[in-house]
Structures are given as C-alpha cells and as structure tokens.
Amino acid sequence: MTAAAPVRHPGQTWEPAEGSTVRGTVLLLPGRGEHPGVYGRFGRRLAFDGYRVQALADVWTLADGGHLAGLVAAAREAGGPVVLAGSDTGALVALAAAAGAARPDAVLVAGAPAGRVAAGTGWSDELAARTACPVHRGLLTEDPGFRPGRLGVPVPAELAAAAEASAPDLPVLVLHGQADPVVPVGAARRLAARLSRAELVLVADGLHDVLNDAAHRSVAAQIVQWLERLRAGGPDLPPLLTTAPREGHTS
C-alpha cells in the first residue's frame, strides 16, 4: 500500500515497574492525526497493572507487515500474551495484520472506521468528536506533534477493504463509544457480529477517541480484565468477577 508520508514521531513504550512480572504486551497503533505520545495516560495505566504497552509511530498502512510480525515475535519473548491494538485507522491495520503475517494472540480495536469515513475538518468540531475529557482536550490542543485536521482525511480505500476482508480466528475486543459522531455505533455492532470470537464493549456517551475519552479509567479497567482472562486461557472464558445478589434478594 502507498500513502503520503506523515511527519515522523518516535515510538514510545511504558514498562511495568522494575522487578515485576510482565503479564503481557500491547502493541498499540495510533489513528489519524495521533502519535504515540498522546497515549501516555493509557500506557501508564496498563503498565501499572503489569502490562507492557508499546505505541508505534506512523502506522497508516500495511506496507510493512513483516515489521509488525517482528515486533509481535520480540514481544512474545517478554512473556504473556501479545495483543495487537489500534484506534481509528490503527484499528483497521491491526485487524488486517492479525489475519496476515503478524499473528498476535488477540486483537483490540477502538473506534474502528467503516469504509472511507471522514469527519469535519474544523478544529472545534474535530475536538468535540474526539473526546469529552477536558485533560485530553487540553493535551491535543497544546501538543505540537498532534496533527489537527487529519480526522477529516478519508480512510484509504485499500486499507478499509483489507480490514473488511479480514476475519482473524483470534479473540477480538471491540471498543466503541455509543455517541461516536465519526463512526456510528452500528458499524461496531456489525464488525463484532462478523468476527467469530469478538466481544463488543460499548461506552455510554463515549466519543471517537474511546481510549482517551471521559470514561478512560473504566475503559482501561475493562481492558485489564479482558487481558487477565486472556492470560487465564482466553477471553472466551467466563468473567473472572461476577456480581452476586445479596441473600434474600433475586436478580
């Protein structure tokens, strides 16, 4: 695949505390306009729970699927499951690569576009579509490395088609904001329905950048629970925690 070369940014990694066991690795592919640094809060949160998070730079296409396969293999040496995760266009790359050479243990997709979707290019509209979190809004507004307006660039047709044709026989966690104005929630429902081992989690009032939206703590906690189930044998297992009714009460 070919695409206009974006501005280069280095990758970034968040490691669990020194001396602790690495419970697994999440290889994170940012979406349109983003760079690895905008996921600092998310990376630190998962690292606190023992998961290594490596955000990759400038992953817009599948031009270097072999590189992703090498990163997956290297991450596997650290121990625990390896998850290929992505937000926005990064989610499409993760899906397509997982069915190809990369072969992670599972896939996490957040705000995955459907077709060649584009959003409005005005900055106030874009910010309102991305997140309701005031902290993250401030970060995007003040970050010189963030590229405003990229959310208005249509998803490359070849990437959208590759993701649509991809059906990896792997556990897939599909995260989506119920109020996402860029990609309607119906697209997430259809995606989860066509994947044989998908689990769909919808975030109430959530917008497009669901990993960095107002409910980011709850979203990260949900991801950690899913990762723990993956470590225990697969997300197809029952939840590790259940809420039991009090004695004398029925649910």
Image (cartoon, helix red, strand yellow):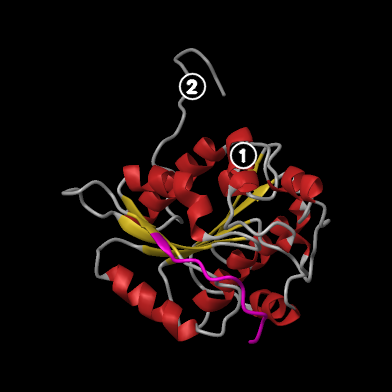
Residue 106 shown in magenta: no
Q: Give the magenta-colored segment's residue range.
A: 1-12
Q: Quadrant of residue 148?
A: bottom right
Disc 1 designates what residue?
Answer: 138
Question: Is residue 238 among the parts visible in the rendering?
Answer: no
Residue at image location 41% in from the left, 60% down from the top? 12
Q: Is most of the magenta stretch helix, strand or loop?
A: loop
Question: Is residue 160 among the parts visible in the rendering?
Answer: yes
Residue 173 pos. (x, y %): 54, 56
Quadrant showing the C terminus:
top right
* Nearer to us in this view, 201 or 121: 121
Q: Is residue 69 left or right of residue 85?
A: left
Residue 139 pos. (x, y %): 58, 43
Residue 211 pos. (x, y %): 56, 48
Q: Quadrant of residue 189?
A: bottom right
Measure the C-alpha gap from mark 1 to mark 2: 42 Å
Q: Is residue 61 left or right of residue 44?
A: right
Disc 2 designates what residue?
Answer: 245
Helix, strand or loop at mark 1: helix
